[in-house]
Image (cartoon, rainbow, N blue to C red):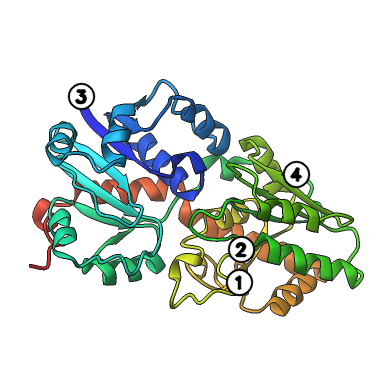
Amino acid sequence: MKKGLIFDPYLDTLGGGEAYCSRIADYLVKTGFNIEIAWKNRGILNKINSRFGLNLENRVKINEKAYYILKRKSNLLKKYLFTKNYQIIFFLSDGSIPFLFGEKNYLHFQSPFAGVNGDSFLNQLKLKNISKVICNSYFTKKYIDKEFKIESKVMYPPINSAHFNLKPIKKENIILSVGRFDEILNSKKQDVLINVFKKMVDHNLKNWRLVLLGGLMKESKRFNRLKRATVDYPIEIMTNVGWETLMNYYQKAKIYWHGAGFGEDLKLYPQRAEHFGISIVEAMAADCVPVVFNGGGAPEIIDDQTSGYLWKKLDGLEKITLQLIKDKKKIVEIAKKAKEKSKQFSQKVFEKKIKKILNDDEKDKHSYSQF
């Protein structure tokens, strides 16, 4: 049986990139690959199932040795002898280019890394053995192509097909935001959203709640400040919730907020924007109207004022939200169009794109080298 290996250095954060890699594993298993995930312990599979609703138990193997060989600056010969045994290796980059020696090696970027010496001789040498570089959005691609002097492919993340099979439930007056509380690569700006909502409440907004959901590896001073800021306001913070709870809140919420990238110099620090925004799509699939910061990958998801709204300034976020709250007909109309747009990011579309990429001719295998 064909062997495949998947490596994601951030797997324990269980964010968008981890959902992406888990979907890749699921697809490859379904197409006949014996898949191994390079990680420290098998318990991660249960966490993936709980967070993403994706059961990989008894379908993939955890390879601890692979994790330490790929994670560390191991002896090059050791990497060669180990990775040459795989027909496919899918590697999520932390900004670096690895030495990989599988039959086909796919390098994935979830973030628009810049200023990492991408066109150096060593990086260009490593890229000679990469079959394809894949980005999660055209926003990411723009920076990766420039940095590494390549022509990458874009493959948008999918949402779980279960999103499209959810039975409608009665909507509540909830504004929802989903995103990790740990600031691994970028901030989801929950503090900004809290302040805007508190201002709206202070100006007489009644009978609405703000609910913040997200992963948290360990509590921090920043997270504790967030919790203190919600005291005496109808704001809820919940961490590391399971799949069913997450789906329930998507179904109940009427409006979805997202603020990653706000207040940042995105020309200088593009990685601080939302690189794609899978939670935005998940909300849209559940008839939730997205009101999202206009930066990063979000404009690739939302048709402004048709399937959602994009904002640049905080008064814009507040104004749009209050208009939606007052106009019940409009909120239903936009929610319907948002749901329809979300279908462009289905598992079926994702798998069709993977198949095309994996079946491409070998003619462009070495196209990334510029010398």
Q: In the image, residue 93 lies at what x, y percent?
A: 33, 52
For residue 253, side relative to residue 187 (left or right): right
Residues packed near mark 3 inside 10 Å, few (<14), some (14 to 19) or many (20 plus): few
Residues packed near mark 4 inside 10 Å, few (<14), some (14 to 19) or many (20 plus): few
Q: Quadrant of the C terminus?
A: bottom left
Q: In the image, residue 143 lies at what x, y percent?
A: 34, 70
Q: Residue at x 38, y 65 (%)?
A: 112
Q: Earlier in the sequence, mark 3 or mark 1?
A: 3
Residue type pointed to by label 2: Lys
Q: CA distance from mark 2 to mark 4?
A: 18 Å
Q: Earlier in the sequence, mark 2 or mark 1?
A: 1
Q: CA distance from mark 3 to mark 2?
A: 44 Å
Q: Earlier in the sequence, mark 1 or mark 4?
A: 4
The label shown at residue 169 is 4
Residue marked by disc 1: 306
Classify mark 3: helix, strand or loop. loop
Q: In the image, residue 148 lies at what x, y percent?
A: 24, 66
Q: Earlier in the sequence, mark 4 or mark 3?
A: 3
Residue type pointed to by label 4: Ile
Classify mark 1: helix, strand or loop. loop
The answer, for residue 333, to whether it is visible in the render is: no
Mark nearer the viewer, 3 or 2 = 3
The label shown at residue 93 is none
Asked if the residue under mark 3 is in contact with the one under mark 4, i.e. CB atoms within 8 Å, the reply is no
Nearer-the-camera pick, 354 or 83: 83
User: Where 242 falls versus 206 (above or below)?
Assistant: above
Residue marked by disc 2: 337
User: Where 242 falls versus 129 (above or below)?
Assistant: above
For residue 176, side relative to residue 67 (left or right): right
Q: Residue at x 81, y 67 (%)?
A: 325
Asked if the residue under mark 4 is in contact with the one under mark 1, i.e. CB atoms within 8 Å, the reply is no
